[in-house]
Amino acid sequence: MRTLPRVLIVEDEPAIAELIAVNLRHNGFQPTWAMDGATAQRELDAVLPDVILLDWMLPGESGLSLARKWRANARTRQTPILMLTARGDEADRVAGLDAGADDYIAKPFSTREMLARIRAVLRRRVPEHAGGQVTIGDLHLDADTYRVSFRGQALKLGPTEFKLLHFLMQHAERVHSRGQLLDKVWGDHVFIEERTVDVHVKRLREAMGAAGVMVETVRGAGYRLTGQVQVPSAVGQ
Ligand code: CA
């Protein structure tokens, strides 16, 4: 028997949570409801869901802070997080993505949109499980142990930046448009804006430190990872 994908709904408003749960159940998902971060944490400790739907405004710890915490935790690091937010403006969306959310859904949202986004993050997870090791210059990525290092120094990357770097390293020296990256890294770009790619490229570069220069912007074309640049040694650190 196929197990139904588990969705943890972290939402303090019972009416909204109930509506989401009913729709998920009718569409072949197994929803669980937590009304705050502490309850959600107990659920996560007991059973790891396939997706977390995380409300931004919660009593106690905010959704943003929970996303950050779960991203930093080894057990939940790879679990997709969709932020539910009434805050539609760009700065807030970027803050959500920066905290480690995979995507966001702006309230009010339609059931169809929510289901499509959940399915998209579930699909996206699959290609990433292609393991293996890639080395470009002094940059080394091990997809089996989920580690990246540059000149022997470990780099800390979020899950999306890791996937992005893995893809760029597997296809180094080639230029990829934002649309291609959405296709190959995110796996579904129906609801994701191309600007999202820029946000993650920026985060990737920051996380790579000096080696960030290896991720090149090719004007009017997209991005490329290259081993052909001189990466300066860290000075005074
Ligand atoms: Ca709320």
Image (cartoon, helix red, strand yellow):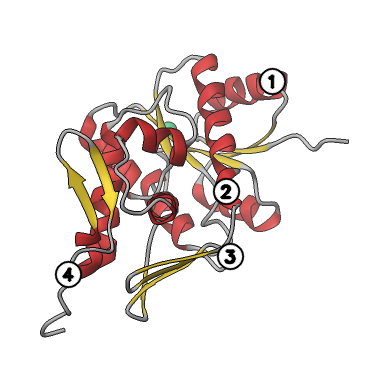
Ligand 1 is within 8 Å of the C-beta of the residue at disc 4: no
Ligand 1 is within 8 Å of the C-beta of the residue at disc 2: no
In the rendered structure, which amino acid carries the disc numbered 3?
A: Asp
Q: Sequence-wise, which precedes: disc 4 or disc 1?
A: 1
Foreground of the two, 113 or 180: 180
Would you name the residue on which mark 2 appears?
Answer: 40
Would you name the residue on which mark 1 appears?
Answer: 27
Foreground of the two, 171 or 28: 171
Q: Quadrant of the C terminus?
A: bottom left
In the rendered structure, which amino acid carries the disc numbered 4?
A: Gln
How far apart are the two marked residues, 3 and 1, measured between alpha carbons?
Answer: 33 Å
In the rendered structure, which amino acid carries the disc numbered 2?
A: Ala
Where does the image place residue 8, in percent across and percent down from the top left? Answer: 61, 40
The residue drawn where x is 59% and y is 20% is 19
How far apart are the two marked residues, 4 and 1, measured between alpha carbons?
Answer: 52 Å
Q: Nearer the viewer, mark 4 or mark 1?
A: 4
Vertical order, 73 against 47 (above or below): below
Would you name the residue on which mark 3 appears?
Answer: 144
Q: Is 11 on the left or on the right of 21, as rendered?
A: left
Foreground of the two, 218 or 77: 218
Q: Sequence-wise, which precedes: disc 1 or disc 2?
A: 1
How far apart are the two marked residues, 1 and 2, measured between alpha carbons?
Answer: 22 Å
Vertical order, 6 against 165 (above or below): above
